[in-house]
Amino acid sequence: MQKTKLSLLLTIALSGAVYAQSVKLQDIIVTTPTKSPVSLQSVTADVDVVTAQDIEEHGFQTLGALLRTRAGIQMTRNGGLGKSTSVYVRGMDSKRTLVLIDGVRYNDPTSLSGAQYEHLLLDDVARVEIVKGPQSGVWGADATAGVINIITKRAEQEGLSATVGAEYGSYNTQKYTLNSGYKADKFDVTLNFEQLDTDGFSAKVPEGADVDDFEDDGYTNNTADLKLGVNLTDKDRVETFYTYIDADSDYDGYDMNQTKAANDAKSSVSSKEQFYGARYIRSEEQGTYTLYANRSKFEREYATGFSKNFDGTVDEAGFNAAVSYMKNGSLTAGIDYKKFKHENKIDNDYTDSGIFVTNANTFDALSAGKTIFSQSLRYDKFNKFDNKFTYKLGLKHIHAHIPGLWTSVNYATGYNVPTLYQLYDGSYGNANLSPEKSKGFDVTANYKGFGVTYFQNKVEDLIDYVTTDFTTFAGEYQNLSGESTFKGVEVNYENALDNIDLAYSLNYTWLKTEDNKGKELPRRAKNSANVALDYYGLANTHLGMLVEYTGKRKKGSYDANPAVDYKAYTLVTLNADYTLNKKLNVYGRIENALDKTYQNVTGYATAGRSFYLGFRYKLK
């Protein structure tokens, strides 16, 4: 298996796309850029695909840990596993990225930070599709920074299949997993389950103190998903699905006395999230037609605080049609209806009706190469906000005269509406808020696995909390007049040295952010980089090393010692796995192998050197 992966990586990295006969890029199918299955080769957007094998080999436990290793993405977390996590895509914070599970919205309408990345475990994930840049022209609001679509595993093997796993590691961390499925001619069913439990360590720690001197803040997560598909005919299929995430996390609340805050044994939050729905799919020779209905349900309960319950739902229904026409044309069009509700003391909702179309054409000139031109247009009608047209244009050229070179450019607009909390909370809400409007572009050149991308995004009327009374710290959410700018350069390179059985990849990001007053935004590193090495030269063995560098970052006015920047830090993770036979694989990893002491949020602790051992066993 290792040799196969190495050979494929080498082929893709060194190929000239469609001009290398052996390459199979047309077999890599993605759904997120257009809302329909298309080959990665034919997409103009900046798309990053992470597979289940990548996740297993590098030992990523949560989505946030995976994302921070990708170009243009950074992560901060308020403590250990299960603690509040922020993900910055090209410098934009979490609430401006749309997160999906199998196409169903994961962004919590009751949350100020969008998706709760800390609860997204990865053992049941088949792949993650990351599309960077404004995507409102396809997906509507909440996609200013991009879209992250988590696609879970489904039964692929005829008959019964099942794999169990277990892992134990530092901080009394225990993980148990089950991936099972059954596939027949007429139907298939998949059941996945993962339990993660850890004693953790204190979320907060006073500066210079030993984290072991304070009470532990534990975390438990039970995630399950069930899928059932029935083939009514050769062309007609019905699918139903259900995902359930039940998580409990201790954290440390606010106290002016840092020692008391770090020993807070009362603060905790219980989260229950459910995602379910059904699809009817009609597959014809020239196109696919999908009718669907989804529901996302969120329940959060806090043990302490002024507001203890946050409950909300997102209901969505729609129809998509994806058709091919002429020789090299494809069109995806559809309508959808969404209702966002925030219950409890907010007790309010809003609706959005949308219509969209995406068209792509490939122009083939053998002497010059191939050119792909894509266009997306969407219209959203809100009952409480201004209606909005958004769009996206993309151009990609695969050069024939320089085999291995392709270039692309994308331009798009975005639209983010305020949350119901920001509008209607009795203490901090502002009913006069306007939606954010954005525009952005990126330009990419890629030659045989070496890619450089320049991007720039501007957000107008950015929504942020503004303190109006520094004596009582009272304030409200406001639109910041003017534009906030996010721009930078991403560099990627991946290759394989087949003669020594070594695969490697690296990425580097330079980022510059400015708020409406020209000030650098906090907690975003100007320089960040990642290096991954994977060695397959020993029989049935994989050895890996991941190096993550995060440069200096500005602090916000709410951080301690805001005039002093966060220090740069480098983390090293070592991985090893060994396949004993066709059924059993054992693995281990050392996270923060150099035992680096660092902070990515002021006052919050991070894990020291940590050890993990586990196994995966195929029952059938």
Image: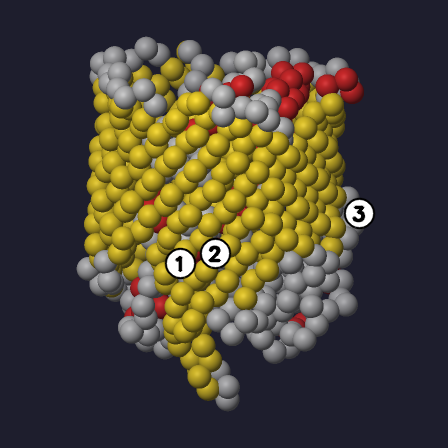
- Taking the spot 70% from the left edge, 72% from the top edge, the residue there is 564
Residue indicated by mark 3:
594
Tell me which amino acid carries mark 3.
Leu
Image side of residue 435 versus residue 291, left or right: right
Query: What x and y, as percent, mark residue 341?
Result: 27, 57
Quadrant of the frame with the N terminus: top right
Badge 3 marks a residue whose secondary structure is: loop
Q: Say if mark 2 contacts mark 1, CB within 8 Å.
A: yes
The colour mode here is secondary structure
Tell me which amino acid carries mark 1.
Ser
Mark 3 vs mark 1, foreground winner is 1
Residue indicated by mark 2:
457
Instruction: Say whether residue 448 is visible.
Output: yes
Task: State the separation of the CA atoms marked 3 and 2.
Answer: 36 Å
* In the rendered image, the vertical position of residue 534 relative to residue 526, given as above or below: above
- Taking the spot 35% from the left edge, 30% from the top edge, the residue there is 361
Badge 2 marks a residue whose secondary structure is: strand
